[in-house]
Structure formats: structure tokens, C-alpha cells
Amino acid sequence: MKRHAKIDGPQTDRRLDGMAQGVLGQPLDRPDGPLKVTGRATYAAEVRLDRMVHGVLVRAPRVGTLNGFDTERVRGMAGVLAVLTEGLPRNSAQGAIAKSPPGNEGKAQYVGQPVALVVAETLEQATHAAWTLEVGIMPSIPVINPHAAPTEFPEKKQRDLGDLEAAMAEAAATLDETYHTPTLSSAPMEPHASIAEWDGERLTLHGAYQMLKFNRKQLAEALGIDPSAVRVLAPYVGGGFGSKLGISAEAVGAALAARMLGRPVSVVMHRRQVFEMTTRRSQTQQRIRLAADVDGHLLGIGHDALVSNLPGETFSEPVQQGTDFNYAAPNRKVVHEVARLNLIACGSVRAPGEAVGVTMFEVAMDEMAHRLNLDPVEFRLRNIPDHDPLDGKPFSSNMLAQALTEGAQRFGWRHQPPRSRREGEWWIGTGMSAAVRVNMLTESEARVTLTPEGRAKVETDMTDIGTGTYAILTQIAAEMLGLPVAQVETVLGDTDLPPASGSGGSFGAASSGSSVYLACLEIRSQIAARLGIAEEDLTLKDGHAIHANRTIPLSQILDAPITTEGHVEPGDSGKIARNATYGAHFAEVAVNDVTGETRVRRMLGTYACGRVLNVKTATSQCHGGLIWGIGMALTEELIHDPRDGHAVNRDLAEFHIPVNRDVPDLEVYLLPERDDWANPIQSKGIGELSICGAGASVINAIHAACGVRIRDLPATPDKVLAGLMQIES
Amino acid sequence: MRPFDYLRAESPDAAVQAAAAPETMFIAGGTNLLDLMKLEVLAPARLVDITRLDLGGIEADGDGLRIGALVPNSDLAADPRVRRDYPLLSRALLAGATGQLRNKATTGGNLLQRTRCYYFHDRDTPCNKRTLGDGCSAIHGVNRNHAILGTSEHCIATHPSDMAVALRALDAELELLSPNGSRRRVALADFYCLPGDTPHVENILEPGELITAVILPAPVGGRQIYRKVRDRASYAFALVSVAAAVRVEDGLIAHVALAFGGVAHMPWRDGAVEGFLQHQPPSPALFAEAASRLTAQARGFGANDFKIPLLQRTLAAVLAEATEVTA
């Protein structure tokens, strides 16, 4: 039996609140945790198959027309089995698209593009042969400067409401500043890896991907076969952050080579390839304009963004996604411009849009608060809209005020003028920012089986990319079916199972969780029917049904396992009400007056994401977001060579993500909330919210500490030092 | 990685004889060499493993200390005599790399680390260090972490070691064993080369020659500071670093030794600046003048221009801390 729900409006029954097992929301350890910390969880690159051989991708060293490879020499090298120069995609597929990634059309359109695959008996032989392969290219001049590139203005991303120019002219206070963020990289711990094996016309791919039902279709189209002939397995994924939403060259290459050789082929990206053969977050230029009256009420908001991508790519970093609804103002203008560049493909990176858009907007808000001589918390509180400022629809829930107030209180927020605290060489300051992130529901299916012995199994092709999916789906089923969590097994990451939302856009937990909820609800209904009662009157706890003072073991109700499916689909709910998550960040930093070095001393975040499914994994997501914020604010930048655009610092020694010593004590508080408009479990995404604006709290704290305003991320010592020296003179 | 022959040396003499052959390199901790071999930036035909040789141990050497070339960075940093008499060295070691790397990296190998210049590490870009005559990609490229002192039109790379900067300030000497069996002692001051028009030559080692020990002279006492300015709090190479050993007597600077990292092709030292400070009463004005003299010949290449004021300010701050003079 299948339970289907299309979400067209608020889900007010809040059925989960009526359950008795008491495990949902609890800080359950990940069921997969022991496997992972003991090395027994098999990640794609660890899969070993009989007769398996190894492929290594080859990069384009320059931009131009591909002009032949000296494959002859390489084919003669020890162990070399094949050199593939056709069929590899130009770049990764975008997320949630059922199409093959684009081919290269005989061109290297960016330095680092995968252009060949060398396959050999051993990884070492393949690696050496790949280094040896000479790529013939008729060079052309790459376009790498967004200001000198052809640009496009996607119609759906422009906004013009009221008259921003007039508001700017008449306002008591205005701000008009331009900000920059650099190219950023997902840099997941696990590199992209695919092991392909054919059984006749059927392909099995052990991969490291986030959205398997789409990955299967992408791969099928790239290979010219039917999706039903493709099985993708990704039970454990070591982080993706968007870079594993769509398939990359290693998956296509492994499948093609395996078909050609009749042997399983493993292709694992080198760390350097992860930086240039998957997707990056576009660099952005953001012009932000604010107009306010004397009381600090915003009259106008302008947010113009220039982003980039390769020619033909539909994705453009949706910088202004949060600007649509973050603050009230009658006059609003958004200009979204996309430059077509010969640089690494851009795609979704954790919180596409808000991660950089909210961050720079929240720096602008801080600057504006100073111009208005207002406490920045108070300034934000004065501008929280009571309905969607674009079209007037209601908010499903807007917890920004609570997040700001609660956060300020817990952090001990006190607004102080810049340069008012000093400890030796160090200036000390605190900063804050708001967090907003759109919330989505996507189609998802799951199967749940309950046995008379009181064991349950959850099955779906959903992924756990380090986020805690195994834990939360186990908890939802245990809560609904009244079972201890140890009695529930969750099986993920296999396209033979019902197709799920996949992990991305913070919708995975709520979407796949809703499908599990629906399947369990169907089981509950069937049990209730056998007892002759309504589902609402049924209590399930510790493997027993409880009704009218009678406690009956499941074994007396069921004579065979019950298997059901849950299927959730988005409906009109998201069109009727603005659905989003909200939060606030607070940071204390120390800035060295001699060197311009910044160290974060403490950080606190308050977030509202509807029902919390597991407080430990949710908090862990927030820690991750805060750390990403520290990195975005202080250290992370994938640097492009000024001549050909190649990523010069494409390794983890030189692309500086925060390390332990950069991360202070982090405090996270999750606000109690139920969002009935979101989905049947009243839960919203938390994977991305905590990165949206986190960096701004650090940047604003730098200003509060030493008076230096950084508008060009990251705030490396050279930039802060330049500001300090300017103040000194 | 290019296939290579592997030989485990049974004695130092056998090691140097084996390493005198063309395209042969020593391997000890391998923390830098293996990375570069995987990128085929280095592609030796043969590796001579010296890790089983009896080149460990830290022992007294007159009033000084003799440090075996195979002493791991972790052990050296933790040695009680080093911590007591040469705290500068201990601090510099702990400012570099990670615990895991320090456990593996050796004293001799640390001195021979290759530059972190992005282009040196990238076979698809020209680099005079890799192939003389191909040109320097950094001069007109991304050069934020590059040198400001002692550069040439052929190379602006820096030496990445923290340990070597401390050893330079401590007047360390190296003991070298040559393939013909002879031993020589060379001051660290004379060991490294500036790029000039031979940027591929980084030191005075002859083919096959092996560093067998580092010798520290008698302790100089005074305040010892290693200050490293970097992009993140740990596991990042120095933008600028200052090693200082300073002793103040009767209100005058009686001893001063200063070495600088992240600014040149070698640990940088400037005798004239030390001479200028010697016998002077410490003051902010004196430090500012010393910093200005240090950078008189400094030259930036765009993105690394900031290193000039950064070096000046860091030196002044270190001198202030060492002499307990505040502005």
C-alpha cells in the first residue's frame, strides 16, 4: 500500500507530536557512526572488484581547440590498457537535472577541463601514463575577466518594485557600496570516485553522489542507454556540499572504459582534480544600495550581482535569493548579470545564493546601522517584514525576531563603537548578522516494512552525505511505529530502492523524512484497522499497541510483515506562503594591530528550522556552517591565474579551509518551532542556514574591533593591514 | 609517479655512493618529496632510503648540541635541552606543519624543503626551477606568498621552512658527508643560494652529498622569539616570520640575532641591521629605523607588496617584546 501526499497547504494535525516512543529529536548517535570510525563503512573509492583496473583523468593545460593526443606513446607504456579521448563531459552535471552533462565539442573551454582518461592495470601505471599523455591544443585566448565578458540577464532573476532611485534620493540615510567574494570550492573530504562494472547491458556504478535518481538518468543519457539499465550505489558519501549533486567526468569515464574493456574500472579524482573538474561557487560582485528614514526603517533595497559560469550552463549563483524577503522596503531592485567565462564550471555549493548573498547583504546592513547610529540588532528588528515584501503573501513562519533576540541575549550582545576594546596588540570586537534561507520540499519516496517481531526496515535511495540521514530516518520510523531505535534498520544509497529527494538544498531531511513518515502512517492505519480503531486513537510504544487500557504485542496483531510506501510531493503550499528558515549569528574576534591577523574567539548561532529531528546531527550541521562562515570570512579563496584563469592554489595546503585552531568554541541554539506549511513533519532544512551570513558576523566583528571595513572577502592579513595602516595615517 | 628504483642504504658511506648516480635522491620522512613525486614535479629514477641509518640522536657537542639529521621534528622540538637553551628552535618547529608531519619529517629533510610557489608545483606552467630557461610564472602571476628580498628576474620563490629560520638566527652549522667519504662543516649562512640566474640551484650540496648533522653553537641566552604571521592559525606557511635572540644588558642591546622567513629564497639575515641595533638602547624609534633598513632593498611584485610593511611591523613588534620596550 502506498500513502501519497501532495502538500497544498498547512499540515496542522502535527501527528508526530502525538507519538509515544520519545526518540524523535533526541541526540541519537549515528547508527552508521561505529562503521565510519572503524573504517568499515565502504566509500566508493574503497570498493575492490575482481579484475578491476584504474583510470586517471587528464586535464586540459590550456584553453583552445583539441588537436589530437599522442596516444601512441602512452599506449605502449607499462600496464596501459586504454586511452579514452572521446565521450567525457566538459563539466559536471548540475543538480536535480535528468540530463547528461554537456560534451566538450572538441574544445577545452577552461584550464583543468577533463579531456582524456588513461586506464591501466594499476593506479600507479595509470597515473604516470596520464602525466605523460600530451594534450594537443590549438590555443585560443580565454575570457576570464567578468567585466570584459559577454553577459546575460536571466529574466526570472530581475526584480523592480517601486522606485529605488527615488527612494535613494529622498532618504535620510543611504548606503551604496560594492562587495566582492572570490571563487570558493566545496572541497569535500572524500574525493569524487566511481567504480563501474557492466553485467551485459546493465551497469552498476559505485559512486560518491548526492541525488541518485538524477545521477542515474544523467549517466544513462551520457552513455546512451536506458536509466533502468543503470544502478547507482552510494551508501556512504564523505561530504558533497553541492559538488556531488550531478555526475562528473570520473563517472562517465569509468563507465565508458569498463564497457570498452569488459572489466570493472575505478576512477578516483586526485585532490587537485576535485578543485577543477567538479564545480565551484562563482566569484561575485555585489552592489548593495540601502535607503532608510531617520528611524532606521528601510525605504529601499537594491542588490545588483555579477556572477559567472561557462557558456551554456543554466546555473547562476542566485546571490539575491534571500534579498527577496529578508527585510521590508517598498522600493526594491535586483539586477542579476551572468558573465560567460572560460573558468571552471559553477554550480551549487552549500547554500547557493544566500551563502554569499546574505553574507554581503548583512555586511551592508552593519554599515547602514553605523550610519544610522543604531544597534545593528535593533536595526534588523525594525525591518522584519510581516509578509513577503515582493508579493504580499504570508510567511509560513518567520522566526527572525526570535532568533535575533534570543541570540543577542545568549551571546551577551552589547553594541560598542569600533576600537573600544584592546588586549595588548589585539583589538577585540563583536559582530552579528542575520541568517535567512529559502526552504523547499521535493518529491521523495520510501518503503517501510514492519515485522510481527517488532523490527522495521526503512528503504530509499536517499543519501547520507555525512549529514545524519541514517539517524533521522531511523528515528522517524521508530517514533511512528513505537520501536526502540535499535529495532529499526535504514538502508540507503541504492537506486533499486524507491527514489528519494536526494541530499541538496537542505531539503533532504524534511522530504525523505516525510516519505518515511507517510509510509509509517500507512502501517499505523493498517494496525489500527486490524484493532478496529481509528489511527488517531492508536498508541505504539516499545513494540506494543496500546488502546483502551490494553497493551498488545505486535506479534499478536501481525501474522506477516507489512510493507508500505510513502510518497510526498510539493503542491501549492510553497506558492501560497513564503517558506524559509531564519537565524542569527554572533561572533567575537581579535584583530592583531601589528599584522592584521584575525582570530575568532567565540561564535554563537540561533536557528529555527521547524521540528528538530535529531538535536545532535542538526547542531553538527550548524557547527559546519559556522566553520564555513569563518573560512569564507577569513581564509578561503580559489585563486585564478590572471592570464589563463587556472586555479593556482588547488590543494588543501594552499586553499585555506579553517583548521582546528581557527575554530573557537561554537555555541548553537535551536529555537522550538513547527512549520505546518512546510510538510507533514513540520520540519525544515538546517544544512545550509548556518552558513548564510555567518561570515558577515566575523567581518562585522573585525570592524567593531579595529575600525577596518572589509568589502572584499576573504579578510586576509594583507587586507586588514592595509585598513589599519590607513587609519594610522 | 614515474617508476623508480628503491635502495635501502646500509651505511652513510654506501648511501652517498649510491646517491652520486644521476637522477638519484635521498628519501627520509618523504613528507615533501613524495608529494612532489606524485605531481611529477620531481621524478627521480632512484631513491636511496636513509631512514635505517644511525643518524639520529641529539648529543652534547662542546658547549653546543649535535643534532642527527634523522631526528624527527617532533623529537627535536620536545628535547629538554633544546627547550631550555634554544627555545627559538623549539618554537619555530612547533609553528610549522602538523603533529603528523612533524612526527615524520626529519631535521635534514626540513632544511631541504622545496618552495611552495604555486607554479613550481604545477607542471603545466613554466618555472625556471623545474626547467631553466622556461621563465618565471610568478613574477606576473599570483605572487602573494612570494619573496621580497634577494629575488631575481628568474625566480621570486621563498624557502618555506620555519626551522631553518630559527637555525639561521642560532648560527647553526651543517655536517656534510660526500660520496668520496670526506666530511665538511658548512655554516647554514653559507648553505643556501639566492636564485640569481640559477634558481634551480638551491644550496651548495654536491651530487650525492648528505646532511648528517646540524650543530648548534653554545647557547646565547637572552629572549628568544619566533613569530610567524600566517593566513590561518595553524598549518599554513609563513607570510612573514621573524626569529629573534636578543639580550639586553645595562640598558643596551648586548646581543641580537635576527632571521626572517617567508621573504626570500633562503632564511634571510642582515648583519648590517644587527650591527645597527648592537649596543644601542632599545626604543620604538630604533626598531622603526632597523625595520626600515631591513627593507631598504625590498621589492614587491604586486600581490606581495604588503609583505614589506608587514615585515617592518613584525620586526618592530618582536624587538619590542624581546626588549620589553613598549611604544
Image: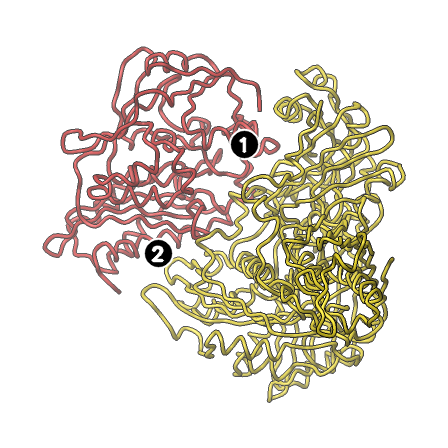
Q: Residue at x 53, y 83 (%)?
A: A374
Residue A218 visible somewhere in the drawing: yes
Secondary structure found at label 2: helix
Query: In the rendered image of this protein, does residue A676 appear above or below residue A51?
Result: below
Crowd around label 2: few <14 · some 14–19 · many ≥20 (10 Å): some
Which quarter of the picture shows residue A15?
Answer: bottom right
Instruction: Give the Cα separation between the discs numbered 2 and 1.
Output: 32 Å
Q: Residues within 10 Å of mark 1 (few under 14, many from 20)?
A: many
Q: Which residue is labeled 1 in the image? A: B127
In depth, the one of A113 and A213 nearer the eye is A213
- Of labels 2 and 1, earlier in sequence is 1
Tell which of A464 and A521 is nearer to you.
A521
Q: Which chain is red?
A: B
Q: Is residue A355 left or right of A377 when viewed as pictured?
A: right
Kind of residue at badge 1? Cys
* Side of A476 relative to B4 (left or right): right
The residue sitting at the left extreme is B250
Q: Is residue B308 left or right of residue A320?
A: left
* Front-lying residue, A239 or B299: A239
**Can you identify the residue that label 2 sits on?**
B313
Which residue corresponds to the image point at 63% horizontal and 73% vertical from the top-left? Answer: A176
Chain letter corresponding to the colour yellow: A
Q: Quadrant of residue A3?
A: bottom right
